[in-house]
């Protein structure tokens, strides 16, 4: 096939916001993402394109993906490469920029993919690539593995993202960018680059302008635990980046000899937010910074609404694709049609499950649980009390449970939990039909969040910054049963949009809290199963309320509105590009 380079269908001059993310998940066939963070980034960009927001996305190519999950007969997770073909999804750009890592030149190029919005507005996303001739092998590998390698590999990747990304935007001709949005701390090295690019020469030597850099940076943190924030030995950072950068300007982000990228971003971002109301509070407490705001996550409505619900929304709520706030009127859709749309999605999911002879039935109450397999998410929670679970079933009716999720290759505890759930799935003593679906990805997430009857989430509080899969479920009329953490504190109205497990005021993370949460869980589950089988009419009302109340709000259109008003505009704007007008510090070593 002959490929030519079509003209950009966006105007580079117009673009004023650059969005940096280590992963951006735009399509299932592009395995550039691992999970929540990347899908949120992709959904954000999709909503920006629908809303004509002049933004450009920057990420790494992650050409071999995260990994493809295969589960062997014993329930062990096997990680296989999961590559994608950039040239089938994006266009290689002619521009090449250079960065220096440990005094060696690393050339960076980019593949561009345009994301088209409902009204035809186009947003470019550049995937940075170092895997080409002229680079040393150790540098060629930097844009292959998402979250692979060791700490030094990660450091080098983040230099490619932050500094390579900035230079690529300059080379591509984006001359009017005045906001750099750092989605998580991975791109924080852009701050060092901005400090030097906005420096001015004077008799006293280089003068830096922290206030100007602060005006330019917006930072979104996603991690509610201190240990989860990237940090690197400061000396190693200096030796990787070389003498060029003003390291004295970021000493405030160094603790015990470690440069903490979150702290660096906090120092130099004029606007900082957590990703749910509660997470904003946790971040303020963690960093002792009262200025930190929150903007609760969302999902891209059109992406996460299944076919059958799209059809009834198109019929009863025309315009919902442009304006998902209108989903608030979903309460008016005839109940039979909501139920039929749900059953269509459920049959599709069950067909996928039954390809493996799992014996699932469309008439049985189905619980869905899919997310990263890691200790704090407690995937085996529902099986903690075998007796209580059996009692729920014998008194109220059958249930079946479908699981999916990957464990990070180095999370051995997560892998053990996966194996445990896998073993339980085969153990008849629980009297529950349990299936585990391999290789959780966007496509499977779509089938799961639309095809189950209830979406279960039982993390240890306060570890879930936001969570987004329950929002996807809400778009398909699937209510949640969840711990009061992350977004659910805001989305939960008991018995209206779903149900809570435990109370928000329980203490976090101790045995007593878990015991109370378990007690409450089995009690609620019994009530819910009974309700599902005995009062279908009221059940469907809850399905509709999940859409009206939650899908209409927990979408990335609302989220992007808030970023535009609270983050991009409020933190000060420019008419002139500060990078262009500052005296350029030496660009290279
Ligand atoms: C939505 C999604 C996630 C994130 O879901 P959480 O509820 O935040 O855990 C992770 N992986 C995939 C494949 C998804 O589609």
Image: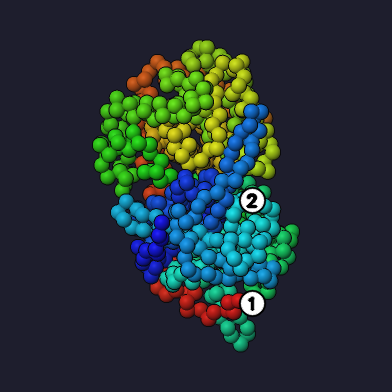
Front residue of this view, candidates 351 and 533: 351
Give the residue pinned by disc 2.
148
| Residue at 67% across, 52% down | 149
Residue 589, numbered circle: 1
Looking at the rendered structure, the secondary structure element under dot 2 is loop
Tag of residue 410: none
74 lies above or below 6? above
Label 2 neighbour load within 10 Å: few <14, some 14-19, many 20+? some
Q: Is 490 in front, or is 112?
A: 112
Q: Residue at x 40, y 73 (%)?
A: 575
Coordinates of residue 583 in the picture (x, y in percent): 53, 81
Quarter assignment of residue 244: bottom right
Given residues 409 and 87, the one toward you in this image is: 87
Decide: is 150 above or below 522.
below
Q: CA distance from mark 1 to mark 2?
A: 29 Å
Q: Is residue 451 visible?
A: yes
Side (left or right) of 111 relative to 302 = right
| Residue 500 appears in the picture as rendered | no
What residue is at 37 percent from the left and 26 percent from the top?
Answer: 343
* Residue 100, horizontal then vertical, whole percent: 64, 70
The outermost residue toward the top is 394
452 to the left or right of 545: right
Mark 1 Cα shell of 10 Å, populated few (<14), some (14-19), many (≥20): few
Classify residue 497 as left or right of residue 500: left
Q: Please name the residue shown 54% across and 57% down the image.
A: 60
Q: Are marks 1 and 2 in contact (CB under 8 Å)?
A: no
């Amino acid at each position: 096939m002959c490929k030519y380079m079509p003209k950009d269908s966006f105007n580079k001059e117009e673009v004023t916001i650059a969005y940096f993310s280590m992963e951006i998940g735009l399509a299932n066939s592009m395995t550039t993402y691992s999970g929540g963070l990347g899908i949120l980034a992709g959904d954000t960009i999709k909503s920006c394109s629908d809303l004509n927001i002049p933004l450009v996305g920057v990420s790494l190519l992650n050409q071999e993906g995260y990994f493809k999950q295969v589960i062997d007969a014993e329930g062990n997770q096997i990680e296989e490469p999961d590559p994608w073909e950039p040239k089938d999804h994006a266009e290689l750009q002619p521009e090449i920029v250079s960065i220096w890592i440990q005094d060696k030149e690393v050339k960076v190029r980019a593949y561009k993919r345009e994301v088209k919005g409902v009204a035809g507005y186009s947003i470019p996303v550049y995937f940075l690539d170092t895997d080409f001739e002229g680079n040393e092998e150790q540098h060629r590998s930097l844009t292959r593995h998402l979250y692979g390698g060791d700490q030094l590999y990660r450091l080098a990747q983040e230099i490619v993202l932050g500094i390579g990304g900035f230079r690529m935007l300059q080379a591509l001709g984006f001359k009017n960018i005045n906001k750099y949005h750092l989605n998580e701390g991975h791109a924080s090295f852009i701050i060092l680059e901005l400090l030097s690019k906005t420096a001015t020469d004077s008799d006293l030597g280089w003068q830096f302008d922290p206030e100007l850099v602060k005006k330019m940076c917006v930072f979104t943190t996603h991690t509610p635990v201190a240990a989860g924030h990237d940090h690197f030995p400061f000396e190693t950072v200096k030796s990787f980046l070389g003498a060029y950068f003003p390291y004295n300007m970021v000493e405030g982000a160094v603790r015990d000899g470690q440069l903490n990228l979150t702290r660096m971003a906090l120092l130099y971002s004029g606007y900082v937010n957590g990703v749910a109301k509660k997470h904003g509070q946790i971040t303020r407490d963690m960093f002792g910074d009262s200025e930190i705001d929150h903007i609760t996550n969302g999902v891209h409505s059109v992406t996460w609404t299944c076919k059958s619900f799209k059809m009834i929304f198109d019929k009863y709520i025309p315009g919902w694709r442009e304006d998902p706030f209108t989903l608030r009127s979903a309460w008016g859709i005839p109940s039979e049609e909501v139920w039929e749309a749900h059953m269509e999605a459920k049959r599709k999911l069950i067909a996928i499950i039954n390809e493996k002879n799992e014996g699932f039935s469309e008439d049985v109450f189905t619980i869905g649980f899919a997310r990263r397999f890691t200790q704090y998410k407690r995937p085996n929670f529902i099986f903690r009390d075998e007796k209580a679970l059996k009692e729920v079933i014998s008194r109220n009716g059958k249930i079946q449970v479908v699981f999916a999720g990957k464990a990070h290759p180095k999370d051995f505890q997560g892998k053990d939990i996966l194996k445990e759930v896998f073993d339980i799935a085969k153990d008849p003593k629980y009297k529950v039909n349990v299936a585990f679906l391999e290789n959780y990805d966007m496509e499977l997430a779509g089938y799961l969040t639309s095809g189950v009857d209830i979406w279960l989430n039982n993390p240890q509080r306060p570890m879930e910054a936001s969570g987004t899969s329950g929002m996807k479920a809400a778009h398909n009329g699937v209510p949640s049963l969840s711990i009061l953490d992350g977004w659910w504190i805001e989305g939960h109205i008991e018995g209206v949009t779903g149900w809570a497990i435990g109370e928000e005021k329980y203490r976090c993370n101790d045995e007593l809290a878990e015991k109370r949460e378990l007690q409450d869980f089995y009690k609620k589950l019994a009530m819910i199963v009974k309700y599902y089988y005995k009062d279908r009419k009221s059940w469907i009302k809850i399905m509709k309320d999940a859409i009206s109340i939650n899908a209409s709000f927990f979408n990335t259109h609302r989220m992007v509105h808030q970023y535009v008003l609270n983050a991009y505009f409020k933190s000060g704007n420019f008419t002139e590009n500060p990078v262009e007008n500052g005296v350029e510090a030496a660009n290279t070593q």
